[in-house]
């Protein structure tokens, strides 16, 4: 038991991707070598309550065992809620630092991969897998992400950012601006969602207004983009300051765009790995993915998504996902599998990268007095 890595896995979350997260956590737990890791599951329930389980090595075999309830009824796995009176729903996680060496947060979307959870883990001084606060926050906000990509000189479709408050005061002005700068069809997205929630394609002024109003229900920041008819190509990035990339994969969606249904209910989407594309396109994707990862100060892992217009051979970056889908059948692990790095090894590497990044940070001095 002595020199095992004590790995905490935080999963679930107040998120539409709660169930996906549970399945991912189970996959990770089942994949890692029980001789090497002791796992402490931490379930963030749908209402935001944190429940910590007992440390386990290999005994967690079914997703139901990860649904830790405060009462622990039936499972015998839960140690108790981390919630404490007056402490906020997540504050007691700070105490986890004494019980685990590293944490793998597998919560997608807001409150999971947007830097908030990462900030909590920074305060707790626990090494954690994946992007830090800054990269997570930039990667989560599609509007800010695009501004950062633009600054890095990465090609992307034209876009217009809109604040919700402007919908009340200047709706016609917004429509005029979008028609002038983008035209139809355009894509309207809440800046902070992911999983294609609240996203729509607008082909007329009426559809645009409806799309803006729908997006505004999910976020106060909205992004509108030019539509591009293109193939959707994705690549994995792994590392901290030195990175490697995976092979390129393609998402082939049967529906009009790759939406929530298509993504999670498997409604006709197909992953083609490796993508059948010319070598120069794969090379362009590789270069741009590394640039994008570095532009947001990424660490650990990211999946970077592209649009490639085959007719005119133009490549645009679409987005970077700092906590991509991570079941063994998700794009990111499959892209690395095809590059010769299997799922268990990928987890080993991510854990090491987390520890290295945490150690690197310890080099910082806090006050000028510490200078020799
Ligand atoms: N500008 C665009 N042009 C054409 N299709 C788009 C555009 N933006 C998004 N899409 C389609 O919508 C899907 C979801 O958009 P995306 O920005 O990737 O959001 P999510 O964070 O939900 O993955 C994309 O995978 C693509 O199929
Ligand atoms: Mg996407």
Image: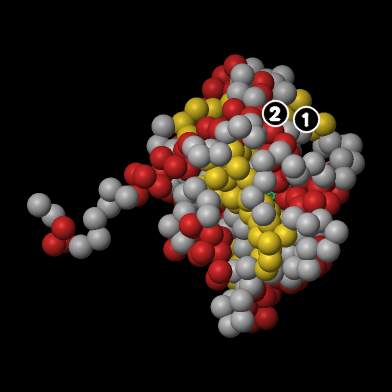
Q: Position of residue 218 (x, y in %)?
A: 71, 68
Is 94 left, or right, of 235 in this rendering? Answer: left
Residue 355 % position (x, y)? 44, 42
Q: Percent x, y for residue 350? A: 53, 37
How far separated are the C-alphas under marks 2 and 1? 9 Å
Residue named by callout 2: 334
In front: 62, or 310? 62
> Which of the two marks, 2 or 1, is nearer to us in this view?
2
For this rendering, which residue is in front, 91 or 252? 91
Q: Quadrant of residue 166?
A: bottom right
Label 2 Cα neighbours within 10 Å, binned few <14 / some 14-19 / many ≥20: many
Dot label at residue 83: none
Note whether residue 56 is visible: yes
Whether residues under marks 2 and 1 lie with C-beta atoms below 8 angstroms apart, the answer is: yes
Q: 167 left or right of 262?
A: left
Question: Residue 271, labelled with which disc?
Answer: 1
Q: Between disc 2 and disc 1, whose residue precedes?
A: 1
Q: Which image quadrant: the N terminus?
A: top right
Establish if 305 lies above or below 275: below
CB of residue at label 1: within 8 Å of ligand 1?
no
Q: Nearer the viewer, residue 39 or 322?
A: 39
Residue 66 on image: x %, y % = 76, 52
Q: Nearer the viewer, residue 144 or 314?
A: 144
Q: Residues within 10 Å of mark 1 (few under 14, many from 20)?
A: some
């Amino acid at each position: 038991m002595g020199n095992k890595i004590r790995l905490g896995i935080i999963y679930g979350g107040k998120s539409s991707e709660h169930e996906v997260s549970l399945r991912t956590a189970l996959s990770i737990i089942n994949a890692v070598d029980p001789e090497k890791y002791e796992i402490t599951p931490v379930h963030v329930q749908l209402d935001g309550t944190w429940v910590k389980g007992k440390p386990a090595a290999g005994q967690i075999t079914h997703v139901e065992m990860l649904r830790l309830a405060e009462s622990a009824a039936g499972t015998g796995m839960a140690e108790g809620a981390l919630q404490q009176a007056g402490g906020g729903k997540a504050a007691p996680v700070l105490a986890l630092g004494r019980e685990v060496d590293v944490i793998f947060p597998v919560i997608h979307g807001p409150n999971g991969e947007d830097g908030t959870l990462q900030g909590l883990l920074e305060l707790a001084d626990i090494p954690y897998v994946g992007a830090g606060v800054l990269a997570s926050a930039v990667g989560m906000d599609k509007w800010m992400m695009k501004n950062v990509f633009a600054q890095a000189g990465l090609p992307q479709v034209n876009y217009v950012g809109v604040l919700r408050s402007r919908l009340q005061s200047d709706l016609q002005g917004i429509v005029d601006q979008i028609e002038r700068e983008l035209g139809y069809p355009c894509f309207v997205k809440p800046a902070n969602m992911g999983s294609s929630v609240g996203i729509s394609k607008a082909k007329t002024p009426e559809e645009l207004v409806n799309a803006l109003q729908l997006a505004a229900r999910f976020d106060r920041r909205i992004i509108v983009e030019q539509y591009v008819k293109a193939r959707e190509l994705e690549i994995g990035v792994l590392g901290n300051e030195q990175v490697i990339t995976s092979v390129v994969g393609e998402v082939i969606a049967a529906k009009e765009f790759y939406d929530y249904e298509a993504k999670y209910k498997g409604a006709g989407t197909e992953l083609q790995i490796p993508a059948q594309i010319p070598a120069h396109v794969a090379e362009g994707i590789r270069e741009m993915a590394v640039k994008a990862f570095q532009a947001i100060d990424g660490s650990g892992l990211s999946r970077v998504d592209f649009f490639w217009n085959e007719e005119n051979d133009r490549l645009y970056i679409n987005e970077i996902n700092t906590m991509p889908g991570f079941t063994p059948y998700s794009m990111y692990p499959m892209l690395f599998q095809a590059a010769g790095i299997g799922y268990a090894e990928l987890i080993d590497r991510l854990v090491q990268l987390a520890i290295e990044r945490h150690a690197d940070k310890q080099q910082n001095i806090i006050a000028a007095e510490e200078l020799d």
